[in-house]
Image: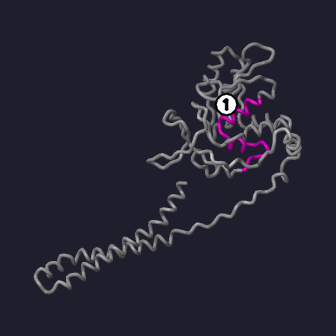
């Protein structure tokens, strides 16, 4: 959006420079011509002498502005219309087991679209996300597409498929626990899960040590730290030494790959549910909206409840 504004400004500025140049040339010409109609009086002579330098200066400035106008006009290239992208028939390259699962699941789950909804949400428009194709098979791309709340929902269902009864908190302070795991044969929580939807940042030993503190506070010896990213070597070592199951993006995908095709499809539907690309406010539990900083014109995610809630998140690239 910011790029389009700058391009629009570049198209408008040459015209303004040309108008200013013409005005300056006209002013200089008038200042040089007017004394000729004032006769040969001393006043006329003094006036002609006084305006000669400003007139020449106005002519020079006008000529420079006109020349600059044509130089800018030559640099600004007209925008070429972008032809609509022809999406391939995704059923021609989908894994056979996924297609079989789709055929069995569609009657119960309803139509499954390969594209997100593009309806108006009442918030600032998203340029890239509504045009992105949803993945139809599990891979790192799925984690890259979805926001943190969708990632937590996927992890919750993943443990639910393993036989645990799960409990989560959609927003607000969670005390360092995203998912509580309960066994059907025991009282109280059996383990806890912390989820980190990070991109380009590793989970360090500091975060894992804090998670161990949460486990200790609740008297638990089992815990899982799940992230879409990776762990540092120190963090992975600390996790092994303290009974923490460290699941990075690759291990999570391997775990998903062990599920049946129907279960994998179920997880994929949860990942791409609703406005999966738009982050959820961790304080309010509502979807955040695009906002623009007044001073820098940079884009970021802000809570829709502003100014009551001032939570914000950086906007990562969707390309």
Q: Is residue 146 magenta?
A: yes
Colour setup of the view: one colour
Residue in view at x 73 percent, y 22 percent = 181
In the rendered structure, the answer to whether residue 94 lies left or right of residue 305 reads: right
Identify which residue, 242 or 211, lies in the foreground: 211
User: Dot 1 lies on which element?
Assistant: strand
Residue in view at x 48 percent, y 50 percent = 297
Relative image position of residue 29 (x, y in whole percent): 29, 80
Main secondary structure type of the part rendered in magenta: helix
Relative image position of residue 30 (x, y in whole percent): 27, 79
Identify which residue, 228 or 135, lies in the foreground: 135
> How many neighbours does mark 1 have within 10 angstroms: few (below 14), some (14-19), or many (20 or more)?
many
Q: Residue 44 falls in which quadrant of the image? A: bottom left
Q: Quadrant of the N terminus?
A: bottom right
Residue 240 in sight from this viewpoint: no
In the rendered structure, the answer to whether residue 308 lies left or right of residue 90 reads: left
Residue 244, above or below 250? above
Residue ID for mark 1: 195
Q: Residue 87 falls in which quadrant of the image? A: bottom right
Relative image position of residue 270 (x, y in whole percent): 74, 37
In the rendered structure, the answer to whether residue 227 lies left or right of residue 258 reads: left
Residue in view at x 57 percent, y 47 percent = 124
Q: Which residues are magenta?
A: 133-158
In the rendered structure, the answer to whether residue 111 lies left or right of residue 312 reads: right
């Amino acid at each position: 959006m910011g790029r389009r504004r700058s391009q629009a400004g570049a198209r408008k500025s040459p015209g303004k420079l040309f108008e200013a140049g013409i005005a300056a040339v006209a002013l200089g010409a008038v200042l040089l011509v007017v004394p000729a109609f004032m006769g040969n009086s001393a006043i006329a002579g003094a006036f002609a002498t006084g305006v000669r330098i400003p007139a020449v200066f106005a002519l020079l400035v006008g000529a420079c502005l006109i020349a600059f106008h044509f130089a800018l006009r030559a640099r600004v290239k007209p925008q070429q219309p972008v032809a609509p992208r022809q999406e391939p028939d995704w059923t021609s390259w989908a894994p056979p087991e996924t297609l079989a699962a789709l055929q069995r699941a569609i009657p119960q789950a309803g139509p499954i679209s390969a594209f997100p909804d593009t309806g108006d949400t009442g918030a600032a428009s998203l340029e890239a996300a509504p045009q992105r194709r949803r993945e139809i098979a599990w891979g790192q791309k799925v984690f890259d597409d979805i926001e943190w709340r969708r990632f937590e929902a996927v992890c919750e269902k993943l443990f639910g498929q393993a036989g645990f009864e799960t409990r989560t908190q959609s927003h607000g302070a969670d005390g360092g626990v995203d998912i509580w795991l309960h066994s059907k044969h025991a009282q109280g929580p059996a383990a806890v899960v912390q989820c980190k939807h990070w991109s380009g940042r590793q989970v360090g030993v500091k975060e894992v040590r804090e998670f161990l503190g949460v486990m200790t506070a609740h008297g638990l010896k089992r815990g899982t730290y799940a992230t879409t990213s990776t762990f540092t070597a120190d963090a992975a070592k600390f996790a092994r030494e303290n009974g923490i199951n460290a699941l990075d993006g690759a291990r999570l995908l391997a775990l998903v790959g062990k599920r049946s095709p129907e279960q994998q499809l179920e997880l994929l539907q949860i990942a791409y549910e609703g406005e999966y690309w738009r982050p959820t406010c961790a304080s309010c539990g509502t979807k955040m909206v695009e906002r623009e900083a007044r001073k820098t014109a940079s884009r970021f995610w802000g809570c829709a409840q502003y100014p009551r809630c001032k939570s914000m998140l950086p906007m990562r690239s969707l390309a």
